[in-house]
Image (tube, rainbow, N blue to C red):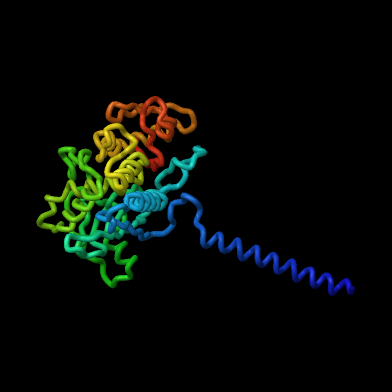
Amino acid sequence: MHPIGALRRAGRRLGTVLLALLATCTLVTVGTPPAHAETTEQYLRLTWDLTNLDTEDAGQEREDQYRRFIGQLRDAAGSPMAGVDTNDMFDTPRGTRTNRVVEVSVWTINGRGQRGIHHILYFSLDDMYLRGFTINSVNYQFRDDSYAFPLADQVRRARNLATAPLFNQIYDGSYRQLDANQQRGGMPYTPRAMRDRLRELGNFTYNSRNDYRRQLAYIIGATAEAARFGWIRNRIAAVLNHGYDPNYEDYPTTLGNFGMELQTHWSDLSRVAHDTSGGGTSRPVNIDGRTYSNISQIRLGTGGVPPLVPFLALRFHKP
């Protein structure tokens, strides 16, 4: 055997192997985003399929679809919490006022039996707040939206429009404005109830805007709040499947006072998680008579409190 020829053949084989490895690495890098890494996209589109709310024997499918959607929503905004070696604690983005938006197209069957996108929701990825929505091709925006880029401009760029679409300004998006009497905790999340709330919201107009505040609070509970709190996600997922939550003796169908108070103490619970992740202490937070003092209680439910994971913490919370 000629030594030079053998070397050349060996070199060609080695080169082929290296090229194959390089191609594999390239496919992994491009095609598989890092697990639980917040998106780098300026404008992200997601789909929420609720066309099976009236379908018999579709409970498990509804639960699976809902959990998958909420996971996508949470992963778009969240990254692993620093200093915590678990896969169930996340933080909102490292920057504020990044102007990133996630658009959620909600597929439903309306009262006329028409299947389609009857609602579009727009969330800020900085803090998972609902900024606005589109119903029957008319756009609305909460009055207290104070992000650096107007939502209309972001939609224009994402859809490559010549001019920015009109967004009608309505009331503030706070729970004080949407649910002043705190009734949302008693609103069930059964398939029929969710169908009815969405159909009601389909009648939203600027002139009738004050009639649909609670429906908006209800939808926020099923989207942004479920992405923040695994407890809320789990409750709604179970009710969509079984018609009630079988994990509790009273078979609840609502979020109750506990779920409602979680929604208004997100910043406080985020502070507890961050302050105690390294063994420190923090001012306790009372949620419907249950006290959370450390990250172990948030994660594991130690001390007789329900666990809240997966938990998406507000990175820039109140001190």
Write down the quadrant of residue 189 in the picture: top left
Q: Is residue 125 visible?
A: no
The image quadrant where one finds the C terminus is top left
The residue lying at 24 percent from left, 55 percent from top is 54
Q: Nearer the viewer, residue 140 or 153?
A: 140
Q: Position of residue 299 (x, y in %)?
A: 43, 34
Counting labels gives: 0
Q: Is residue 33 above or below residue 319?
A: below
Q: Position of residue 86 (x, y in %)?
A: 49, 39
Q: Nearer the viewer, residue 54 or 267?
A: 54
The residue lying at 50 percent from left, 56 percent from top is 33
Q: Is residue 63 visible?
A: yes
The residue lying at 32 percent from left, 27 percent from top is 290
Tell which residue pokes out farthest to the front in this image: 57
The image quadrant where one finds the N terminus is bottom right
Write down the quadrant of residue 253 in the picture: top left
Q: Position of residue 256 (x, y in %)?
A: 24, 36
Q: Is residue 6 left or right of residue 217?
A: right
Tell which residue pokes out farthest to the left in this image: 207
Q: Position of residue 87 (x, y in %)?
A: 48, 42
Q: Is residue 281 left or right of residue 48?
A: right
Q: Is residue 14 above or below residue 297?
A: below
